[in-house]
């Protein structure tokens, strides 16, 4: 019996191909990255196929998830929650076109699964190691070049940011996360190879690949939505982004500037307060705590300001309700949360789909870990529609041109990955 394994790039690529032969596949990858506040258990989780599967629309989705997880207690589960589940949490609507078409919620008891700890220990699925190792990787095929269009022009983006600032002046919101879509209405890609290239260019602690019928997610997220370990919960909102420097001195200076930025700290603090309020809905009284405020963490493409909020789950609250009460992540909405989501619907032009949602796993003990789906490509292999979205927090102090520049920084790894297709 194999007890430990070295997680190499070749092994991960073989595992990805091994998983994706089935109609449903999920890969969750820490990419050997340090987690903010050192909150991490699993380095790599790979699933293939379904023993049981829940797919549902928005209405009543969280209650169906509760029933499904109660029925399958003691089993591993993986799945995703799309952004529009906000409409199951609050009295909200979504009217924008959705060209990708991920179902609102999907949760799966996998047929095959491999889980490896951050120490290289095999938690589950050692019987699949040989099968994965024997996978013959196909020759790297060239995808057709992808021509990306912007749904919102730079000029319209700047006008929208000014309009949102007027809502802030009027007191509607303090902060709002405004996102825009980049898309290709006709693309032939190999999602597995695109994901592998994206993660190589941007290794992050919450990488995720999902194949759900014709729907694909290729995710290079640095952000955690919510983790439960025993009765302890952790949420780690990101607000505050800086590019990396061209050399060590510039890099250190940019990192320090991010830490000292009053604007970025104000944005982060607003969302920390929102997350504290969200967790308080399911926590024991007095247990919500800010473990780390304004932590600066560096990734391949960017520096990020990350805070960590913890809480103790109340004994009379089902953990699915903890997910529900905190969903969607405050960093992707704004404050106050409900009004921010109403304005997002008013000003954005595309359904977010799985973007701004969450992908994660549930253990047999009822613990879980879900990311925030950002820095991600979504793809529908039937209509060959490909998109990604980027955005940022708009506050009273926002300078529209700088907000637009930040969007392009966040899109850097994705644009770089797509530009290499066909070469």
Image (cartoon, rainbow, N blue to C red):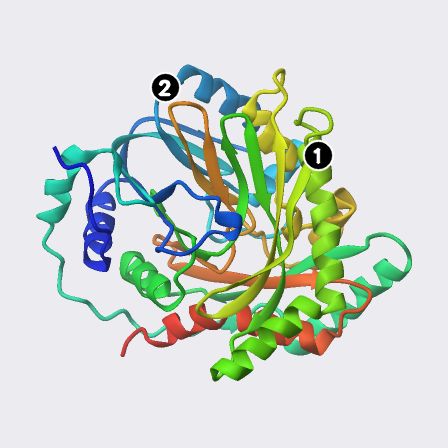
**x and y percent of residue 90 in the render?**
70, 34
- Which residue: 8% across, 48% down? 134
Q: Which mark is residue 9?
A: none
Spatial CA span between label 2 and label 1: 30 Å
**x and y percent of residue 108 in the render?**
37, 31
Nearer the N terminus, badge 2 or badge 1?
2
Left or right placement of residue 318 versus residue 416 in this view:
right
- Which residue: 70% across, 53% down? 344
Quadrant housing the N terminus: top left
- Which residue: 63% across, 15% down? 316
Q: For mark 1, give the secondary structure.
A: loop
Q: Is residue 200 above or below residue 71?
A: below
**x and y percent of residue 248 in the render?**
48, 81
For residue 345, say whether it is visible. Answer: yes
User: Contact, CB < 8 Å: mark 2 with mark 1?
Assistant: no
Asked where in the image residue 296 lies, by quadrant, the reply is: bottom right
Judge depth for marks 2 and 1 and give the one in front. 2
**x and y percent of residue 103 in the render?**
47, 39
The residue where tag 1 is placed is 90
- Taking depth in this image into account, of 210 and 127 the one nearest to the observer is 127
Left or right placement of residue 57 versus residue 340 in this view:
left
- Taking depth in this image into account, of 229 and 24 the one nearest to the observer is 229
Other-residue count near label 1 (Cα within 10 Å), few / some / many at <14 / 14–19 / ≥20 = few
Q: For mark 2, give the secondary structure.
A: loop
The residue where tag 2 is placed is 74
Q: Is residue 258 above or below residue 225?
A: below
């Amino acid at each position: 019996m194999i007890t430990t394994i070295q997680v190499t790039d070749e092994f991960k690529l073989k595992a990805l191909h091994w998983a994706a032969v089935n109609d449903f596949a999920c890969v969750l990858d820490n990419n050997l990255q340090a987690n903010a506040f050192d909150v991490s258990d699993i380095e790599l989780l790979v699933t293939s196929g379904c023993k049981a599967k829940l797919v549902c629309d928005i209405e009543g989705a969280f209650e169906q998830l509760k029933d499904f997880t109660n029925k399958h207690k003691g089993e591993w589960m993986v799945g995703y929650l799309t952004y529009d589940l906000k409409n199951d949490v609050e009295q909200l609507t979504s009217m924008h076109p959705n060209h990708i078409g991920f179902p609102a919620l999907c949760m799966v008891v996998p047929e095959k699964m491999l889980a490896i700890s951050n120490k290289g220990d095999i938690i589950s699925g050692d019987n699949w190691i040989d099968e994965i190792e024997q996978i013959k990787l196909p020759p790297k095929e060239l995808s057709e070049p992808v021509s990306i269009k912007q749904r919102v022009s730079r000029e319209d983006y700047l006008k929208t940011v000014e309009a949102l600032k007027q809502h802030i002046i009027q007191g509607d919101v303090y902060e709002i996360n405004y996102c825009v879509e980049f898309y290709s209405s006709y693309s032939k890609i190999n999602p597995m190879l695109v994901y592998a290239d994206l993660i190589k260019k941007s290794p992050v602690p919450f990488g995720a690949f999902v194949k759900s019928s014709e729907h694909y997610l290729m995710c290079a997220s640095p952000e955690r939505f919510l983790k439960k370990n025993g009765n302890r919960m952790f949420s780690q909102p990101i607000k505050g982004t800086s590019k990396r420097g061209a050399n060590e001195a510039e890099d250190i200076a940019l990192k320090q500037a991010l830490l000292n930025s009053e604007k970025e700290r104000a944005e982060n603090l607003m969302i920390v307060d929102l997350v504290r309020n969200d967790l308080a809905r399911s926590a024991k009284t007095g247990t919500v705590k800010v473990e780390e405020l304004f932590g600066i963490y560096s990734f391949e493409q960017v520096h990020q300001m990350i805070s960590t909020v913890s809480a103790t789950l109340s004994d009379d609250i089902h953990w699915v309700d903890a997910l529900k009460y905190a969903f969607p992540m405050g960093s992707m909405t704004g404050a106050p949360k409900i009004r921010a989501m109403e304005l997002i619907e008013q000003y954005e032009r595309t359904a977010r789909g799985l973007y701004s949602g969450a992908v994660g796993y549930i253990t047999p003990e009822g613990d879980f870990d879900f990311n925030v789906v950002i820095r991600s490509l979504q793809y529908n292999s039937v209509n060959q529609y490909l998109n990604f979205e980027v955005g940022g927090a708009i506050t009273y102090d926002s300078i529209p041109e700088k907000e637009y520049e930040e969007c392009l920084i966040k899109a850097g790894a994705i644009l770089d990955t797509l530009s290499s297709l066909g070469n």
